[in-house]
Amino acid sequence: MDAVVRLTVEGDSATGAFTRPVEFMKLRAQRGSPLPHTDYLSVGPLQDADETASSLTEEEFVTGRFTDLPFVLGLRLPRCRHAVADKREGARPVWFYSLADMSWACVLFRDGGRARVWQWGPRRLWDEAVRAYEWWRDRGSPGLHRFGLTVSSSGQRVWLDNPSAESWPLDVSPA
């Protein structure tokens, strides 16, 4: 999900809060390249992946396209894309793809059962997603309006509630 941020320039930096989600047609140059799902699985096939279970439920994690959690996942999981598939026969897969290497993860939520998780590669993407979810939940599930951005010559930093409080670098390298 994309969001609008209103920045105020002060000296050699600009700071401001995110104001609302947006969606618009991106130019081809602004779109990420298509993810070759089969390329990821040919490098790290499902049968070679580490398989575990997750206590997170579909209702907790799959919150919808224009909700706050996908925004937070975008901020907290650098160089990663995730895709929520349609639900079929009581099952919904959610995929994570690293843009830095060929790591991937898939969590399969099933109605009435524990979610199964497969991860392959050096990045444990589902573990990162769970940590991002817990971070967000532990702070009261903040909405995007509580997040902000500071841009300076030393980079871009995202913050929660206050630019001088908790912040982390925003990875803006091309996908």
Image: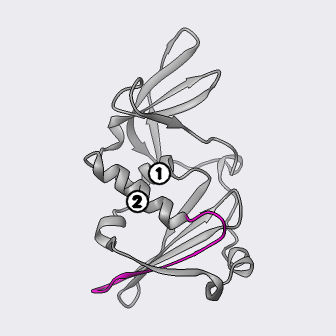
Residue at (42% x, 54% y) in the render: 132
Number of marks in the image? 2
Residue 108 is covered by the magenta coloring: no
To which residue does mark 2 refer? 65
Q: Is residue 66 visible?
A: no
Q: Which residue matches tag 1?
A: 1
In magenta, the rendered stretch is 110-124
**Within 10 Å of the Cα at label 1, are there few (<14), some (14-19), or many (20+) other Cα atoms?**
some
Q: Are marks 2 and 1 in contact (CB under 8 Å)?
A: yes
Q: Position of residue 156 (x, y in %)?
A: 57, 31
Q: Quadrant of residue 20?
A: top left
Point out the residue furthest to the top here.
11
Compare marks 2 and 1 and give the one earlier in the sequence. 1
Q: Residues within 10 Å of mark 2 (few under 14, many from 20)?
A: few
Determine if residue 139 is in view: yes
Horizontal side of residue 161 vs 43, given as left or right: left
Residue 19 in the image: state x and y as whole percent.
37, 34
Q: Residue at x 34, y 50 (%)?
A: 136
Q: CA distance from mark 2 to mark 1?
A: 7 Å
Location of residue 144 in the rendering, given as x and y in whole percent from the top left corner = 36, 42
Q: Amino acid at mark 2?
A: Arg
Q: What SS does tag 1 mark?
A: loop
Where residue 23 appears, as percent x and y from the top left, is: 47, 49
